[in-house]
Image (tube, rainbow, N blue to C red):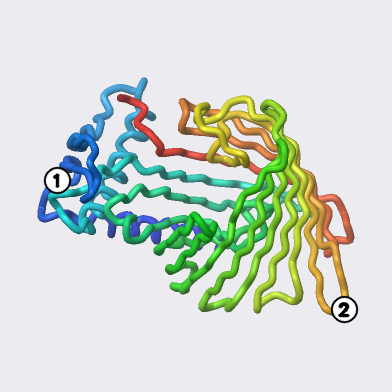
Amino acid sequence: MLIHRNIRSAIHLIIIISLLSVFTTNGEDATHLTATNPPGLKLKPITPIKLPAIPVIRNMTNHLDNIHDGTYLRLQRSVNSFDTFFAKNKAERIEIPMSRFRLGTYLVVEDKDDKVSTKLEPDFEADLDLPNIEHRFGLFINSFRSEDLPGVDPVERKSSISVGLQHILEDLHLHSRIGVKWRDAPVGIAKTEWRPKYSIGKMTIYPRQRIFYETDDGLGELTSLTLNRWLGRNFARLVSAGKWTEQTTGIEWEQSFLLGHVIKRIEESKTADIVSNDDVAQGFGVRYSIFGHNSTDEQLVDRHRLTFIYRHPLYQNWLFFQVAPGIEWRNEDEWDPIPSIQFGLDTLFWELTQK
């Protein structure tokens, strides 16, 4: 069943990317877009956008780079065609920056009751730059379930592909989305999240309040508070979160503490208060998490988890390997220790390797 679900997720992703490539602009080549400034702005003219040709594999020394760049250019051309199709004025199209795509694969091996089990889960995320669309609405595509508690591992999340529209009110710190999620069948989704940011000395505080609705699971709410403190390249993070839905009994909650060290960032010029796989090229950390639930008549701790995480660049600055050995104690298993190890492979399509 797991293999079938992963195949369905991959098929859904291929369909979405294929649909993007259908929308072309009056038969024009989407790799060459004449871009000018939007009406009312007096800026220097933007030069025409010319994507390079898709590279041809000529030798094994640059085989991986050619595959990476060829895939990236095909995805970007689909994005260009889709964005240009929705431009209000074809003669005044806005320059289309290169988008970002991340494709991850995670494998966990667990030893429980002297039996070894494995689970494989894909993870996809696209950060699409669509200037001709986004002055009216935004677009999102991802495969992760944002309604899960923050500390839930990728292999524990329900695999699905989500696509839809988003709108951000920066002054009010509100992020809203509406769209469709594919799991076994299409499911309508909608959510609004309040996500401000505060600083007290060298500590950054991130409160989050999210209300969401899914046509299959109904209404839900997720509240979290994250405290993050940097000291050079070292950081400490404390996360508290609680979740309620119409499908759960009471409130599910999490308490996590993370200590980490960043050896190298993917983009050293970019500084992020809360680093994730999208920021770290090489680093390590240790995380301790407690998960539980509250109901009207009981308050239970469901499990404890201790994990060591190491991340390392595997090739260039776009292919990364991650290993995370850990141990978990679960109430349902009478608190017997359950060792596991998780392997992750992240492929980033952020820039061309051969310029």
Q: In the figure, is residue 202 to the left or right of 69?
A: right
Name the residue: 37% across, 35% down.
68
Is residue 105 visible to us here?
A: yes
Name the residue: 33% across, 60% down.
15
| C-alpha gap between disc 2 and disc 1 | 64 Å
For residue 276, above or below residue 301 = above
For residue 296, above or below residue 322 = below
Q: In the figure, is residue 23 to the left or right of 216?
A: left
For residue 103, above or below residue 217 = above
Is the residue marked by circle 2 packed among few (<14), some (14-19), or many (20+) residues within 10 Å? few
Q: Position of residue 337 (x, y in %)?
A: 85, 50
Mark 2 is on which residue type? Answer: Asp
Is residue 2 visible to us here?
A: no
Mark 1 is on which residue type? Answer: Asp
- Which is more N-terminal, label 1 or label 2? 1
Q: In the figure, is residue 60 to the left or right of 286?
A: left
Is the residue marked by circle 1 packed among few (<14), some (14-19), or many (20+) residues within 10 Å? few
Q: Which residue is mark 1?
A: 29
Circle on res. 150: none
Quadrant for the C terminus, please.
top left
Name the residue: 28% across, 28% down.
57
In the depicted view, which residue is nearer to us: 341 or 154? 154
Q: Position of residue 35 (x, y in %)?
A: 19, 42
Q: The residue tagged with tag 1: helix, strand or loop?
A: loop
Q: Which residue is mark 2?
A: 297
